[in-house]
Image (tube, rainbow, N blue to C red):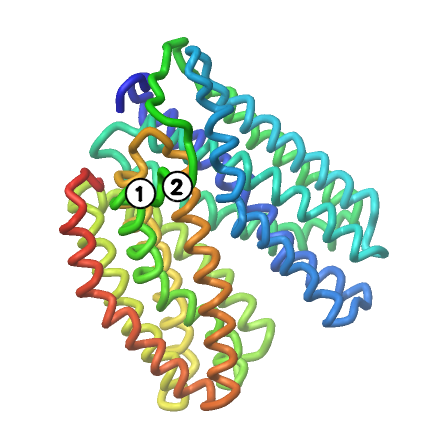
């Protein structure tokens, strides 16, 4: 990429990306796991808890301001503002977490408003983090960077979810969130490792969404994202209800999902090694194959005992992690142009939009034809994705490892 500084040490890049991925995913874990449980324990109505879904909006819409962030990040005069964007975003998130501890559980509307602010700041910082990772990861080592990113995301979601619930249960609301804010400060310090030499950057065009759309690699990357993640998004929407129908109690489901998150984190690390060793496409194919197997077992829940279902859920988490690592390694190659922050953000927004649309569609379909039938249909999706993945991978000749 012309005008871009030489790649940094992969250890430094992975450390920054991994630590900040943990910090950013803490917000998601708090919004979608911890706060609903904590607020429900304080008597919040189910329809009130639905407001927490608004926290996803900044992550799905950040493509709209990605070009502005990218222009400010790379002004072309030799300065790099990656670190400033990262630190400003994380400082806002820390302040928001402290504010949640101060406000307390009495005002759900205020809590959601604070979380949306934190999510907006975190999503904005993520634009700079992704661009930094794309530009500074040495060719052939993208699997390591994506493993740090995906593994960090799993870890952060667990920290913001189950760990936060435990902290609040032991130390109380205010102290629990203060401890979480302290952890966020420590993680955010990784941004100080970002070092860039002052070097004039040649930007042939202003970063924009139109420029991204004219790029064939970006359009194919969007298609690849939707194809690879479709089965996962359908299964994620259906699995909890399927487990309830199978007679597994809520504590058991919670423990099972936590175990799946841990397995997913381990799989992300293994997936990073596999991408470096074999490339992204074989890892994606393996993930799709595991999805077919695991979703199929979950769909035929009445034929299996509890242990088989539990193993299938964990395998599904492993498949999700492997698929995401392989996918993101491929997408890093497609985003390695003149506006990596914009291009990679578009891929992530496509993934988020797909999650919302496919998850809603799956639940609507289940209400009409039943969970078993809908889940069985979902099991065929990753199977039919194998051919498109092969075609889209072959049409992109950039290095994807």
Looking at the image, residue 114 lies above or below residue 142 = below
Judge from the rendering whether residue 147 lies leftward or rightward of residue 249; answer left or right.
left
Q: Position of residue 175 (x, y in %)?
A: 77, 42
Label number found at residue 308:
none
Residue found at x 42% / y 54% = 350
Residue found at x 30% / y 32% = 337
Q: Residue furthest top?
A: 198
Q: Residues within 10 Å of mark 2 (few under 14, many from 20)?
A: few
Could you say which is closer to the camera, residue 1 or residue 303?
1
Could you say which is closer to the camera, residue 146 or residue 258?
146
Quarter occupied by the C terminus: top left
Q: Residue furthest right?
A: 106
Label number found at residue 210:
2
How far apart marks 2 and 1 lie (CA) works out to 6 Å
Query: In the structure shown, which secondary structural element does the residue marked by tag 2 occupy?
Result: helix
Label number found at residue 214:
1
In this rendering, does residue 73 appear at all?
Answer: yes
Residue found at x 29% / y 42% = 215
């Amino acid at each position: 990429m012309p005008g871009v500084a030489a790649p940094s040490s992969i250890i430094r890049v992975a450390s920054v990306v991994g630590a900040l991925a943990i910090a950013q995913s803490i917000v998601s874990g708090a919004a979608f796991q911890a706060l609903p449980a904590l607020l429900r324990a304080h008597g919040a109505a189910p329809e009130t808890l639905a407001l927490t879904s608004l926290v996803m909006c900044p992550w799905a819409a950040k493509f709209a301001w990605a070009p502005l962030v990218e222009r400010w990040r790379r002004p072309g005069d030799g300065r790099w503002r990656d670190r400033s964007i990262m630190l400003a975003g994380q400082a806002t998130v820390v302040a928001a977490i402290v504010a949640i501890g101060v406000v307390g559980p009495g005002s759900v509307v205020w809590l959601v408003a604070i979380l949306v602010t934190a999510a907006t700041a975190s999503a904005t910082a993520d634009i700079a983090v992704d661009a930094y990772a794309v530009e500074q990861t040495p060719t052939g080592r993208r699997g390591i960077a994506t493993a740090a990113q995906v593994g960090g995301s799993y870890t952060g979601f667990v920290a913001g979810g189950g760990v936060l619930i435990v902290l609040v249960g032991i130390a109380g609301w205010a102290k629990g969130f203060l401890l979480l804010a302290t952890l966020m400060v420590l993680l955010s310090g990784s941004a100080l490792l970002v070092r860039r030499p002052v070097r004039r950057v040649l930007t042939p065009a202003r970063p924009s969404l139109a420029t991204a759309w004219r790029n064939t690699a970006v359009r194919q990357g969007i298609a690849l994202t939707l194809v690879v993640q479709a089965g996962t998004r359908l299964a994620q929407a259906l699995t909890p209800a399927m487990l309830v129908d199978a007679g597994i109690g809520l504590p058991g489901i919670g423990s099972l999902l936590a175990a799946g998150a841990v397995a997913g984190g381990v799989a992300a690390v293994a997936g990073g090694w596999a991408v470096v060793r074999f490339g992204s496409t074989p890892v994606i194919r393996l993930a799709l194959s595991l999805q077919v197997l695991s979703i199929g077992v979950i769909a035929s829940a009445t034929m299996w005992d509890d242990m088989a279902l539990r193993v299938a859920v964990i395998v599904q988490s492993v498949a999700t992690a492997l698929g995401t690592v392989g996918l993101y390694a491929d997408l890093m190659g497609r985003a390695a142009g003149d506006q990596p922050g914009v291009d990679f953000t578009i891929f992530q927004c496509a993934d988020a939009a797909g999650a919302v649309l496919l998850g809603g569609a799956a639940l609507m379909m289940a209400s009409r034809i039943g969970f078993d039938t809908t889940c069985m249909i979902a099991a065929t999706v990753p199977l039919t994705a194998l051919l498109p993945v092969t075609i889209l991978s072959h049409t992109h000749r950039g290095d994807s490892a």
